Image (cartoon, rainbow, N blue to C red):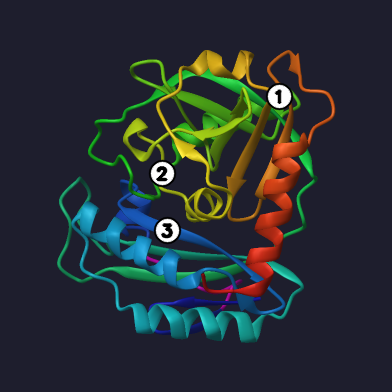
Amino acid sequence: MKLWVDGGLQDAATARVSVLDHGLTVGDGIFETVKATAGRTFALTRHLERLARSARGLGLPEPDLDEVRRACAAVLDANPMKLGRLRITYTGGLSPLGSERGDTGPTLIVALGEASRRPDSTAVITVPWTRNERGALTGLKTTSYAENVVALARAREQGASEALFANTVGQLCEGTGSNVFVVLDGRLLTPPVSSGCLAGITRALAVEWTGAEETDLPLDVLERADEVFLTSTLRDVQAVHRIDGRQLPGAPGPVTAKAMRVFDERAASDLNP
């Protein structure tokens, strides 16, 4: 396996980043996960635009997106696979111990891992912890993911693949690595970015392609929704058949099934929407 570290390809077994990298010591970094099918990326331009937005939000130097594209192409060429998770990581680089950044410049890593197509439906849980819709990192795709690790571990313990959060005012927000949509009285709804959720690439495309409405939703909408589905880079559109102890028989329901079909068709016709 080959990956890209700061300017070139390296063997995964011997590639090295300093133990004093700010991404390691304090989680000072950003990332993107891009779906790659037979070496071809999906929505790469949108992902790189969000990478740059996250860098600005975190105060990191603007990434050289041409270099990132070259790195992605090199890693994909070096590691042929049917379906892959292409991970772009960009950190504060070598820095002193503590929160202050050093002046050596950022670290860029691009790696690829094999992936498999997700099932058509999945189980999710809700967790008691909240997303802070007013936090300094809100809306940024940062490497500070320990909160998600804890929530996802709880989901796995309960036979689910995702955990859903409310925000600090009790509104439905997002999953650890996904956005959430609900069908209520025939309307397809999803929390707005102002709820504190990440502006997911798949979320944005699903809104655009299905006409879903963005609106504040209480967390307990999950107890009443006729259908629920998740969106993310590797899930695309995935139905939910269980939320905590509540079963949603027949998932994917008709609205979700249509969203899945529309997304698959549109994504297949344009790899860089």
Q: Residues within 10 Å of mark 2 (few under 14, many from 20)?
A: many
Write the residue at 51% across / 48% down: 207
Which label's residue is closer to the chain start, 1 or 2? 1
Pick the residue in front: 66 or 183. Answer: 183
Residue 117 sits above or below residue 190 on the image: below
Visible residue check, residue 85:
yes
Task: Estimate the spatial distance between the alpha carbons at disc 2 and disc 3, rounded to whole Å.
Answer: 13 Å
The percent position of residue 108, horizontal first and vertical second, equals: 38, 71
**Magenta: predominant secondary structure element?**
loop
Q: CA distance from mark 1 to mark 2?
A: 25 Å
Horizontal side of 74 relative to 263 (left or right) equals: left
**Residue 157: numbered disc:** 1
Residue at figure coordinates x 38%, y 78% from the top left: 6
Q: Where is residue 129 shown, x and y percent of the image?
A: 45, 19
The earlier-in-sequence mark between 1 and 3 is 3
Q: Residue furthest right?
A: 250
Please give the residue where the numbered disc 2 appears in the rendered image: 198
1 and 3 marks in contact (CB < 8 Å): no
Q: Residue at label 3? A: 31
Point out the tag, 2 or 3, that comes first from the N-terminus: 3
Write the start and end of the magenta stretch as one range.
Answer: 11-18
Secondary structure beneath label 2: loop
Rendered location of residue 44, percent (x, y): 49, 71
